[in-house]
Image (cartoon, rainbow, N blue to C red):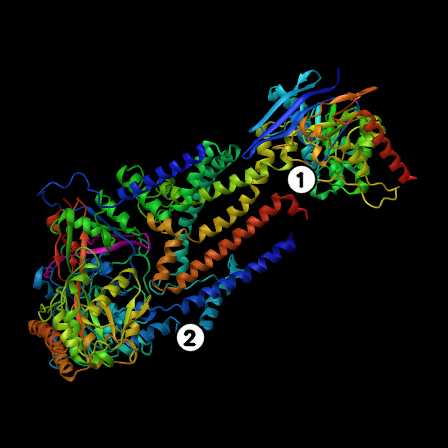
Amino acid sequence: MALLEVKDLKTYFRTDDGIVKAVDGVSFNVEKGKTLGIVGESGSGKSVTCLTVMGLNARKNTITSGEALFKGEDLLHMRSRRLREIRGNDIAMIFQDPMTSLNPVHSIGAQLVEAVQLHRDVSKKVARARATELLQAVGIPRAGRRLDDYPHQFSGGMRQRVMIAMALVNDPDLLIADEPTTALDVTTQAQIVNLIKNLQSEFGSAIILITHDLGVVAETADDVLVMYAAKVAEQAPVDHLFNRPHHPYTWGLLGSLPRLDADVERLVQIPGQPPSLLSPPKGCRFHPRCPYVMEKCRQVEPALVGISGDQDHLQACHLDEETKDREAAKLLAATMAKAS
Amino acid sequence: MLRYLIRRVLWAIVLFLVVTLVTYVIFFLVPNDLPSAIAGQGSSKAQRERAIHYLGLDRPVYIQYERFLWRMVKPVPVHVGGVPVFVRPQGDLGRSFIQATPVNTLLKSAAPVTASLVFGGVVIWMLMALPIGILSALRPRSLLDRASMTFVLIGISAHPVWIGLIFAYVFGFKLGWFPIQGYCDVINPATDCGGPVQWAYHMFLPWITYAILFAALYVRMIRANVIDAMSEDYVRTARAKGAPEWRVLRSHVLRNALLPVVTMLGMDIGLGLGGAIFTETIYGLPGLGKLAIRAIGISDLPVVMGVVVFATFVIILFNLLIDLLYAWIDPRIRLS
Amino acid sequence: MHKRMMLSIAMLVVGAAMLAAASVASPGAAQKGSSPLGSKARKGGILKFTLYAGIENIDPQRTYYVPEWQYEWLTARSLLNFAHATGARGYRLVNDGAKSYTVSKNGKTYTFNIRRGMKLSNGASITARNYEHMLLRVLHENVGSPLASFLTDPAAVEIVGATAYNSGNATTVPGIKVVSPYKLRVSLVRPNVLLPTLLALPPTGAIATNVPFSPVTSVSASNPLPAGGRYYVQEYVPDRSIKIRKNRFYKPLGAPPTPGIVDGFDYDIGVQQDQALLLIKNGQSDWAADGLSPSAWGPLFAQYGTKGRARAFPSSVSDYVTMNNSKGLFANQTVRKAVAWGIGRNALVNVRGARAGFAQCSLLTPAIPGYKRCRSYPLNPNLSKARTLARGHTGDHINYWYTSTIIGTQIQQLATSQLNAIGFNNIDHRPFSSGLFTALGRRGNDYDFAIVGWQQDFPDPYDYLNKLLSGNTIQDVQNNNTAYFNNPTANRLLNKAATLKGQKRLTTYGNLDNRIMSTWAPIAGIDNRNDRNFFSARIDVKSIVQSRIYLIDLGKLALK
């Protein structure tokens, strides 16, 4: 049994303008100790998916359906008391902007201690010791002395490390990281990504890494979920995806990857804008932007099915397989050529 | 911190001088009939000239201002056991033109009354505003929220004079639950009625009247601040850590949402101490507001200046204290 | 949407409730349980009065305000006093602190024989020294007594050496001499009959000789203020309260006794006028000593009439039109008479509310001795007569100066419309937030028309007719004769009347008032203002006595 099994998750928000379908039928599994990368543009539903799993959406005007089985217990239909026991304890989450995600008027020590004492009946002294331990683990120098410092006294990268420490302080089985590096500069990004990887091997937690950056996914993920417009476009183990991408959107993402080692004149863009989730396009949601669009795409929504020879690799596109293989190969050759 | 304090104190002195000078100038620019008021309606020209001269009003304005300042700040020795040890400013604010009572006496008698009203009012309006504001923020657009917004509208629109008259009439006259008006000192009663029980009994309606406007304003502010704070990222983090709602509210939301309230409170207390004019007039509370109104009406310059000096001093002091308090409780400022 | 509509309905309900509450809150609501008839008045008890603006001075030599004088008539034992009688008999001066007095043949020296056996409220005997000390305090510049001007007036009463003493140039007053313990001599620079009137005023009561030459600002057990009258001030806390109690050492000793039925009076200072009305209605207070708000009187008189708990009677305040006789349009006597015929006196009085006053065309009021009813001009405009008199001049320019209070503005608007009705259409207005009278008193200003009021300094027609209409007193600034009326015949008559005594004086002044109005019309009398009063049910209505000088005679009030 997988650590987390999400089945047909749907999250709709009631607004004054109508119902926004932020997540419209997403299923995936996360295995113990493994990393799942969720990629997509802003508005694709990747963050909402995880917030729904954690139960962190506003309760009012939110309709949720589906299942999210964590070690067999359905998180979506759980009593809030039990859910609070799991949050911060068995499943932890870190967010995109560490400056605003930490409370500016409490010391980071206080916030770390709070994370500990919410779930363990220990004294403040013990909690502080544990906090110091974690700060050292995430690479904060002179950790013990910095416990009483405030968030604004840390740099951006340091703050994210603190967030990570706070998430891992109770040794969770699953860590959800929602765009942890987006708000940081490039060098710090690399550091954080490395940190997460090292901590995973040290603590043994599974990770869901949400990002729009395919490069990070390539480095860290075991499995990848590509989301577009609240639905899954493609999902596969990481090397399968990169070696044999089978969705025009994924091709667009790969082609638009900036590469330092390539002589690229212009980044390839995916033309157009993501669709409105109030009234998504009929048929395939990507069809208005797809260079390969057919008449069928405009009418019929493609089902998420496996590709031949690889049952772990799912994609939702009407294009036939030969075309997709051909285009995938072309894309890879082009990028390789540029690289050499 | 010390440098900050010194800078603030210097600014306070400058502000004080500016305010008192402007008041002096305005007083002499506005037409008044002082000679007649002081010497009497039927007095002769010679009589009026003598009266004006005696009070120093025939000197140029800047001379009068200088004398006023000097009388206030002139250093006088402080004796400890008969030996002059250090100096303090004399603090003499002169005598009323019309009553000849020393202004310091009038202030000493009026200030505690206004302080009673304002501080009691603060407690009541915070007791009203905090729960209503917070609950409204937690349940936006609910019936409670709409009812509290209606209360806010009424509280801001209804004039304290009107509220005071209605309350005194309904609760004082018709129902007889509270005194219609009047003030009783807590200690050293000046009149027959005194002591803490009578004091609170007489102050109850004035407190509510005074508090309503502020309660309304603060409900609105607290509600807005809490709603904003609830949507902050660190609140989400706290929930993600598994904190129960009450803890999220107390430790994370309120701690941040109520910070600006501290600043506002300091300012409003300072302003209130300057004179809660309407409530004092309706309920016959002999405080600074009433003193100021009467003095302005009869062009009694020393009393007007006395209230201005006192109010300025108090407002500046309070703002300084609140700034220090705020700097202390908000670590972002304290440690910068 | 459903929720929005609910909010609108809620607002409607609230608005309606507020309107309903506003109508409920009018102070005219009837009080249950009115007083039973014909209960016998009893002695004793403490009356509770309220004051809105408080008093300005507790120092007896500094008092100058009607509510202050009202109780001071009872606490002062002056050399002379006014009879506590109603009607014209109330103008009579009687000997009180002075058993008798003589005037020298040249009219300049008064010798007062002090009554023996009088005592202050602390038991100390009253002698001539007490009256000397009082006079010195009146004249001392540190004390700042408004009465000083009347004792240093070169046109009227001037005590020898008083002016020098008052300006700080002398340390004694030769004109005041204690001849023997019970004999006081006062010498004047020139003869004048007003001295006895001045020595009957409340600020001239005997005072303890140790009261310093600086203003007394509070009274308590530790710094008392003994007085020789029927009552004394036991306690004064500035802005809070005054307690007045009976002087157990008071004995008439042959003088007409000052009335005093209750044990004392407690004044509560700072009570807002609408609240005062409520307090009187439920018996927590007995009387508002400085009046109620103007809108309260209509319902009160409607409910209680004018002979019971609510009363209205003439005061010394006289409102009149003052016209600039020295220049422009109103230098012409005929045009001035046009105004006197065309001004709407009744309408102008009614602006001030129910029973605010009585329209009249004289300058004196029934509260001033010598008053004689003026029949020269009507109380309602006679426009045909007015227009005839104004013919040919209606286009001339009028500078109308007025006080810009609410009442002042309403009166101005009404008077302007009345001037328009006469035919005057070229009117410019200038508002004054304060100091109108002083501005009018600056010689050479360019005002033409104003409406002012005058209140007595002391109850004698001199204070009105000579002060306001004699050409002899015109100076550069601070003129009281704002009409700048300077007619040799009138001046001669006014000066002559000032030398008369007794009933002759009063009759002459009464006729002179009428004659000046009908012949020269330098001003146009409008009304005299009423003193309006409302008492609680505790007071025995039969004990409410109004006299010309004392207004409500506090000493005669009794509880049921």
- Above or below for B97 versus B326: below
Dot 1: chain letter:
A
Q: Nearer the viewer, mark 1 or mark 2?
A: 1
Specify the quadrant of the image occupied by residue A30: top right
Q: Is residue A118 visible?
A: no
Q: Residue at x 84, y 46 (%)?
A: A265
Neighbor class of circle 1 (other Cα within 10 Å; few <14, some 14-19, many 20+) is some
- Above or below for A175 versus C179: above
- Above or below for C139 versus C202: below
Horizontal placement of B2 versus C501: left or right? right
- Secondary structure at numbered mark 2: loop
Q: Which residue is mark 2?
A: B59
**Three-letter amino acid code of the residue under disc 1:** Thr
Q: Which residue is mark 1?
A: A100
Residue stretch in magenta? C231-258
- Secondary structure at numbered mark 1: helix
Residue C377 horizontal/vertical position (percent): 11, 70
Specify the quadrant of the image occupied by residue A33: top right
Specify the quadrant of the image occupied by residue A173: top right
Marks 1/2: CA–CA distance:
63 Å
- Above or below for B80 versus B116: below
Dot 2: chain letter:
B
**Three-letter amino acid code of the residue under disc 2:** Arg
Q: Nearer the viewer, residue C164 or A53?
A: A53
